[in-house]
Amino acid sequence: MHLVFFTDFDGTITEQDTCMAMAEAFARGNWQELELQWQKGELTTEECARETLKLFDAGEEELKKLLTDHVTIDSHFIPFVQFCRQKGHEIYVLSDGYDYNIETVFDKYGIKDIPYFANRLIIKGRKFDIECTHSSRECPRCGTCKAELMEKLKPEGALAVYIGDGYSDLCAAKKADVIFAKGVLLSHLCREGIPAMAFDDFSDILKWLNRR
Ligand SMILES: [Mg+2]
Ligand SMILES: [Zn+2]
């Protein structure tokens, strides 16, 4: 059977959430309140990100250094990618975070040729902004609407496997055939009675693949 993996980036491939790490390092002001409003659905991703980015006191150099010095990936992710390539399974990264962060972290680990969809981080000197090029007309909340992308990208007859950990994964995960979840995604799915497999890292997904 043809498998297609759709995976979140922040906190799923990476061990830290790069958007949180940026805010913690660079925001001068109450970004936590914005984050809470976003979690409650009172702000869209675009609104929350734009207001948070306005609080930043940093430029590209500082961001690049933060990402390369402090962000690490799940040590089983690269073996997972290699396994999928051998078997012909597809992988897409779907992120409601930033393209710049994904590119920088993938570069650091020499990870190439994994298609990803994320929000654009615009950097002009010491000013940051967000551009949402993968938003959906039907979904006001997401910057990058993972549910809509998954429906577009999934080939007919393939088994869609979703891997994630956060609020922005909830809608997409529900549309997948198989869900691997941790963090708030797992607790939300449990509360709604939606079956999902709990996982700690990509070694659990490799084990599942080897059992098939
Ligand atoms: Mg995440
Ligand atoms: Zn959406």
Image (spheres, rainbow, N blue to C red):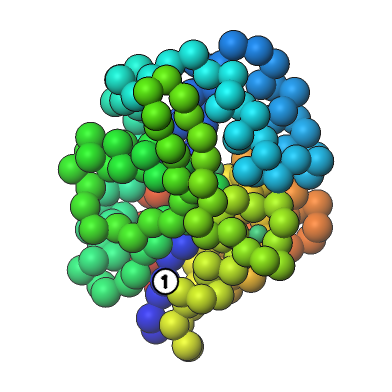
Disc 1 residue lies near ligand 2 with CB under 8 A: no
Q: Residues within 10 Å of mark 1 (few under 14, many from 20)?
A: many
Residue at the limit of the structure toward the bottom, as seen here = 157
| Residue nearest the viewer, comparing 58 with 21 | 58
**What residue is rendered at 37% in x and 39% in y?**
100
**What residue is rendered at 59% in x and 69% in y?**
148
Residue 211 visible in rendering: no
> Which quarter of the rendering shows the N terminus?
bottom left
**What residue is rendered at 65% in x and 29% in y?**
51
Task: Judge whether 167 appears above or below 101 on screen.
Answer: below
| Residue nearest the viewer, comparing 160 with 61 | 61
Residue that mark 1 sits on: 4
Task: Judge whether 150 appears above or below 204 on screen.
Answer: below
> Which quarter of the rendering shows the C terminus?
bottom left
Q: Quadrant of ligand 1?
A: top right
The answer to which quarter of the image holds residue 43 is top right
Residue 121, x across and y down, in percent = 44, 39
Residue 46, x across and y down, in percent = 63, 43
| Residue nearest the viewer, comparing 195 with 55 | 55
The answer to which quarter of the image holds residue 40 is top right
- Identity of the amino acid at label 1? Val
Q: Is residue 98 left or right of residue 183?
A: left
**What residue is rendered at 81% in x and 58% in y?**
192
Residue 194 visible in rendering: yes
| Residue nearest the viewer, comparing 186 with 10 | 10
